[in-house]
Amino acid sequence: MLTTLAGVSCHSSRPASPDAATPAPRRPRVEPPREPIPLRAPPADTGPSTSVTTRPVPAVGALVTIPAGSFALGSTPGDPGRDPSVEADLARVQLPAFTIDALPFPNDPAQPASSGLTREAAERACSERGRRLCSELEWERACKGPGGAMYPGGNTWGGALCAQGELGRCASPEGALSMGTRLAEWTRDDIDARAIIRGASATAAAPLHRCASRRTALPTQAGLELTFRCCGGAPPPPMTYPREVSRRPFREEPMTAAQVSALIASVPELERLRLRDGLAMFLPQAITEVMNHGATTVELHPEYTFTVNPVRWSPTFGEDILVLAGRSRAGSWVAALWVLPDGRYRHASSFLLQNDAVAIALAFGEARREVVWSSCWNCGGEHGAVSYTDANRVLIVQR
């Protein structure tokens, strides 16, 4: 089930902003929210790009034509700022051809974007022009372009160049301008009686400007710092945003040394460590060796399941990570990899006990957000965890 995007109440007398940093609850509150916000505070901006896509400022009423075809909806597991509970894993979606306003309403480069309207008022404004409010899938397709750009101006965020610079800067690959670079935008879609919005205000953190970023607002709330744009053409067929699959937190996934070797070769961060040289996977006896080093036994720790197999780990709804341990000439190691929808892997974190080829066992219990690793159970420095942080990142630590 797709987790609800939600908002919270704000008691400021200033116009509401959709970019507050306070994490939202998983369910809508009873009182109407004054501002739409992300589910979690995104990671800090790592720095703006100095190279962004620039287009000529369009004429009044200019339209951008988007051809029919498929595109990859959502984001890649491991993308900074990605919320796996509400963003699809690059699901292929087919859309008919449509047109989208080159600029937010009123689609006039000489006028500021309209903001503060309810979604119903935005829908009415589009209808009066013989057009309709864009769906969230149409908005994302126009933002990403055929190549699947991460941000409207390319694969990096342009910072002030996009949020406050010349109007023609940070155009989407298809030529749409100001796509969520200065204000968030209404879409026609809902989730649990809340409207899906895309994009973010000029002062928002970079991840909120990603084409795949999804948040919500109360559709009847006026006065929000939200704008909108209109689309044309035949309305797309009814489509439901792909819902995430609920996974068990931990699933053992046995792999041979040959399979792990091929996996390592496909992940540059692991290949650089030369982990395929002298690669060997641990046998079940390694668990006993680890416990003996710590002067304990498995039976004394019934709260854990111990294994030497790789573990498919779902630390939070929508996330799928492979944790594995092995031994190479360089030493024993632990790695965590995001599992991509096409069967490939992306490096999340890795840890090498350099020149120390000791046995390592993995363990998991009630704490969903960590997988324990150990070469000596509960021995300082020889024991630790693969942890999932509140910023949706993976860290391998020693304890």
Image (cartoon, grey):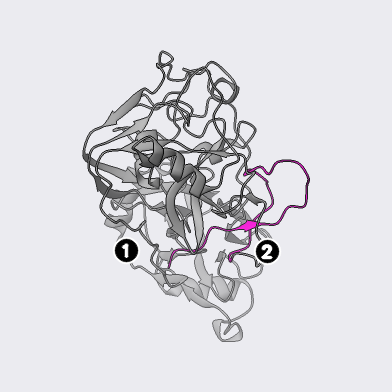
Magenta segment, prevailing SS (helix, strand or loop): loop
**Is residue 338 toward the left or the right of residue 238 in the image?**
right
Q: Quadrant of residue 239?
A: bottom left
User: Helix or strand or loop: what does disc 1 sit on?
Assistant: loop
**Residue 297 x %, y %:** 58, 82
As for residue 19 lying within the magenta part, the answer is yes
Q: Quadrant of residue 147?
A: top left
Read off the residue under disc 1.
Answer: 255
Amino acid at dot 2 = Glu
Q: Quadrant of the N terminus?
A: bottom left
Residue at left 29%, top 62%? 256
- Residue shown at 56% from the left, 25% from the top: 112
Q: Nearer the viewer, mark 1 or mark 2?
A: 2
Q: Is residue 253 above or below residue 134?
A: below
Front position in the image: 312 or 32: 32
Q: Which mark is residue 31?
A: 2
Q: Residue 177 at what x, y percent from top left?
A: 44, 25
Circle 1 residues within 10 Å: few <14, some 14–19, many ≥20 = some
For the record, the magenta segment spans: 1-27
- Proximity of marks 1 and 2: CB atoms separated by less than 8 Å: no
Can residue 352 be seen at all in this image of the molecule?
yes
